[in-house]
Amino acid sequence: MAAASSIHFLLSFPLFLSFLFTSTLGRLSPQATTTTLDVSSSLSQAQHILSFDPQSLKAFAQTQTQPLFFNSSTSAAVFSVPLHSRGSVHKTHHTDYKALVLSRLDRDSARVDSLSTKLLLALNGVKKSQLRPLPTQIQAEALSTPIISGTSQGSGEYFSRVGVGKPAKQFYMVLDTGSDINWIQCEPCSECYQQSDPIFNPSGSSTYSPVTCESKQCSSLEVSACRSGKCLYQVSYGDGSYTVGDFVTETVSFGNSGNMNGVALGCGHDNEGLFVGAAGLLGLGGGPLSLTSQIKATSFSYCLVDRDSTGSSTLDFNSGLPADSVIAPLMKSRKVNTFYYIGLTGFSVGGQAVNISPGLFEMNESGEGGVIIDCGTAITRLQTQAYNALRDAFVKQTQGLPSASGVALFDTCYDLSSKSSVKVPTVSFHFGEGKSLDLPAKNYLIPVDSSGTFCFAFAPTSSSMSIIGNVQQQGTRVSFDLANNRVGLSSHKC
């Protein structure tokens, strides 16, 4: 009897251990976190943007915005202006949504290449002036043609509404954290592209003032020339776009929240490229000629509506950070003062940390590496090692979804044509000290056609620098606390 009991115990014990081990694993493994992708809503919005008439925004263009006040302790003036997606301001000529997506991705690739080149030139100590004849050899009229430099800041996807001149005339301007020079198309035009508003006429402003060649503003330009003692500027872009004209100071107004006199900007008489719809560009980078630097902003923030949305949000200056912001370090490079580097440490998929090398996203002493956050780049670019790890983790947890062929730079796509909604693993950004930001599903699974093909909206880059793009920022108020070197990320603050 005792022998039989012993045999029964020996046979049962391994099963007990197996049960105990399995149960323990179940408790230790975090349950996969998911979020719902509204397939029907995304496709409906995609169709709507193709037929949307921007004329319906005219009434909004006349409305005044009030700045959003958060935890601002600064005594600086608080400014606020409306913020729109490109598609809500300028009607697309595309009748097919996939063609629209491909054109966006082409623009985006040109921008990413140019930002990477800008960094590469800086790391190698190459100045823009070295990419063309020396200034003493330049004739003023030579600035009427584009200078192919290989660096650019891109054409932009979000427009803000600001006033220029006195009395102020309202204009849609591209919002760009990846560049510094502010500029606007000006009469008389030797070559101007189509814009939504009448072209700015300097003769109608009492505060228009040319900048002299000896001024600090003129010497701060990367490319400049002189004509009759007045400063000329040139900004060229990797996609072939460029602007050339007089460098001046003007009054810039921010709705009914105030104005700033003496802002240095380019008055472009020869402008060509992909800036269709916008009157010019607001440079919000970290350089001395950026709008943020010139108005001495202690902070600024924006919230980007969905790119296919006809809604709007605001760009605010000196308004502080929302109390519920996920805080990440804000860093600057000694090589390129334009870019805003953010302290990304990693990510998780479905609540499980993605395995990447420690320090993969850190910027080294020479200025290589790091992660910038940029409103002008659409698709987040990650170093290849990081991208592969993130993609593989996502694919592993979405094996139940029907796959589709890759599209353009996207190698991971799904056929969701038969679904109205679907649960997908949550993708989260990690910023150290246990802080993380969960992304909505629509910020990483985006439609690439009207029939239900959705792609994982990340891409690899061979550059040492990674970029968090605007698709991943949609619906999040991104606050740059310049005074305290912090970035705040707060969901649902549009």
Image: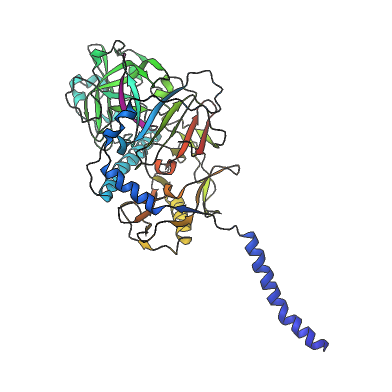
Towards the viewer: 448 or 332: 448
Residue 417 picture location, percent across and down: 35, 59
In-image side of 209 versus 302 (left or right):
left
Quadrant into which the C terminus falls = top left
In-image side of 362 versus 184 (left or right):
right
Q: Residue 275 in magenta?
A: no
Residue at 34% over, 18% down:
264
- In this view, the residue farthest toward the left is 190
In-image side of 416 versus 365 (left or right):
left
Towards the viewer: 243 or 437: 437
Towards the viewer: 70 or 149: 70
Residue 336 seen in this snapshot: no
Residue 140 picture location, percent across and down: 20, 19
Residue at 32% over, 47% down:
46
Residue 464 picture location, percent across and down: 42, 43
Residue at 40% over, 32% down:
177
In-image side of 468 versus 21 (left or right):
left
Magenta stretch secondary structure, dominant: strand
Magenta highlight range: 166-178
Q: Residue 168 in magenta?
A: yes
Q: Quadrant of residue 305?
A: top left
